[in-house]
Image: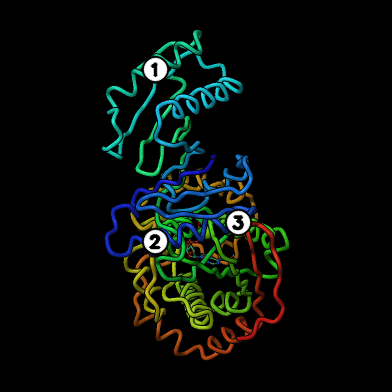
């Protein structure tokens, strides 16, 4: 019988909650695979069992986007008889050689079930000899084998396989509450989103744009970024798009231009807080990193945070730009993030932004600008909502505030 064994790493260290994490992971895997498979959870493993004989390898490639998986293998299961094991080893080696021109191999035995009468030190060379006898052009290489034949002896049977495919590790999305990410079309916030999902958080997103200064290409870019993020999400991913132009003009025309970015960010946060309230998320997430630009000094981050009722998580706070870029490439975001379409903020950047904005000063400005709250409400009313499922995008018109 052919099946897939999924291994976990971090979840395996959990004690009391392990079954909750494992069930969530199994559910997320099921949502990623088109066909109906059945699932069995056994301690640190999930078995994916197919009704038909063949498991669709290509479809399994989707598992690279399921957080919580350490690795997986397509395995043949057989009963705990030496002859049955040999038969499967023969079959698996033959199949591996059909598609690969391997010259060397090694047998790995893990005897988790200690009552099996042959121990691993005996079984490995025994099966090695068996392979040598049947496939004379293969040679043993204990250090760098091209073909690895692994035999896992468990109470309920022997599991035999040749390949371990990597998963993305982390925790299954859905075990760590939910948040609203402030998602720009840049490099940082999409990576921040993925990092929070990798810790098990369910996300929705708000993006601010500046019509007519940011055109359809910018909208298209943020939708493409959201699509990529949605592939890591077992559920629908919701994106709220909010026009910021009027608010930006308001701050641009103030006497103290150097505060305009901070004021704009505070408005963004107040609006994001509203979206978070409406959609019932617990925290906000942003892509800020300490010292990266003028608005990301400690003083300015504090002044920005002051406008938010909800806690803001900043997973990139200690990252270098290069580290973030590496992650952006790793998660398939980079090529889209560097498309040259204007971000809503860059258009209204003042020549010399303040690096140490003081909260009192900023609240004084806000208090003497009563239009702010009216324009924020308006912006929220004019927002658009998109539902993105595994890359397919649908605008939802019945969004009520
Ligand atoms: P990013 O690469 O994510 O755009 P950045 O390096 O350009 O970040 P800033 O422009 O200072 O830095 O933005 C800081 C954070 O504020 C972003 O990471 C994002 O969370 C949020 N943000 C900025 N612009 C927008 C926007 N137009 N819509 C939504 N969130 C935004
Ligand atoms: Mg940006």
Q: CA distance from mark 1 to mark 3?
A: 49 Å
Which quarter of the rendered picture does the C terminus lie within? bottom right
User: Residue 12, how many percent across, how many down?
Assistant: 32, 52
- Closer to the camera in the image, 266 or 127: 127
Compared with 242, 64 (above or below) is above
Compared with 282, 24 (above or below) is above
User: Residue 348, how many percent across, how many down?
Assistant: 57, 67
Give the labeled residue for mark 1.
128
Q: Residue at x 45, y 33 (%)?
A: 160
Q: Residue at x 40, y 84 (%)?
A: 363
Choose mark 1 or mark 2, whichever is in front: 1
Is the CB atom of the residue marked by disc 1 within 8 angstroms of ligand 1's nearest atom?
A: no
Give the labeled residue for mark 3.
225
> Position of 319 compared to 78: left or right?
left
Q: Is residue 293 visible?
A: no
Q: Mark 1 touching mark 3, by CB under 8 A?
A: no
Q: Quadrant of residue 357?
A: bottom left
Dot 2, how many residues are within 10 Å of its Cα: few (below 14), some (14-19), or many (20+)?
many
User: Residue 137, how many percent across, how many down?
Assistant: 51, 8
């Amino acid at each position: 019988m052919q099946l897939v064994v999924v291994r976990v790493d971090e979840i395996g260290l959990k004690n009391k909650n392990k079954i909750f994490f494992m069930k969530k992971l199994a559910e997320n895997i099921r949502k990623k695979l088109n066909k109906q498979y059945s699932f069995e959870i056994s301690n640190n493993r999930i078995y994916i069992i197919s009704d038909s004989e063949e498991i669709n390898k290509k479809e399994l490639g989707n598992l690279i986007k399921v957080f919580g998986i350490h690795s997986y293998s397509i395995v043949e299961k057989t009963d705990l008889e030496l002859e049955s094991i040999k038969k499967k080893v023969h079959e698996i080696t033959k199949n591996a050689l059909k598609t690969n021109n391997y010259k060397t191999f090694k047998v790995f035995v893990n005897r988790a079930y200690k009552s099996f009468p042959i121990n691993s030190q005996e079984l490995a060379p025994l099966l090695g000899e068996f392979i040598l006898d049947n496939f004379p052009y293969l040679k043993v290489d204990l250090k760098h084998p091209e073909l690895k034949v692994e035999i896992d002896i468990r109470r309920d049977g022997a599991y035999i396989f040749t390949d371990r495919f990597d998963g993305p590790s982390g925790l299954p999305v859905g075990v760590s509450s939910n948040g609203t990410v402030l998602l720009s079309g840049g490099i940082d916030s999409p990576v921040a989103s993925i990092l929070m999902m990798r810790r098990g958080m369910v996300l929705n997103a708000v993006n601010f744009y500046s019509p007519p200064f940011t055109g359809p290409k910018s909208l298209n870019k943020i939708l493409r970024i959201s699509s990529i993020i949605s592939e890591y999400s077992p559920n629908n991913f919701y994106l709220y798009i909010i026009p910021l132009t009027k608010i930006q003009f308001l701050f641009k025309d103030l006497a103290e231009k150097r505060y305009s970015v901070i004021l704009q960010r505070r408005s963004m946060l107040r609006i994001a807080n509203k979206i978070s309230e409406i959609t019932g998320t617990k925290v906000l997430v942003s892509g800020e990193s300490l010292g990266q630009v003028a608005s990301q000094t400690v003083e300015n981050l504090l002044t920005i945070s002051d406008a938010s009722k909800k806690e803001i998580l900043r997973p990139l706070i200690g990252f270098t730009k290069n580290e973030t870029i590496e992650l952006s490439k790793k998660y398939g975001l980079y090529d889209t993030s560097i498309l040259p379409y204007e971000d809503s903020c860059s258009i209204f950047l003042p020549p010399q932004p303040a690096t140490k904005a003081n909260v009192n000063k900023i609240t004084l400005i806000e208090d003497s600008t009563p239009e702010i709250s009216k324009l924020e409400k308006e912006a929220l009313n004019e927002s658009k909502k998109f539902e993105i499922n595994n890359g397919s995008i649908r605008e939802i018109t019945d969004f009520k505030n």
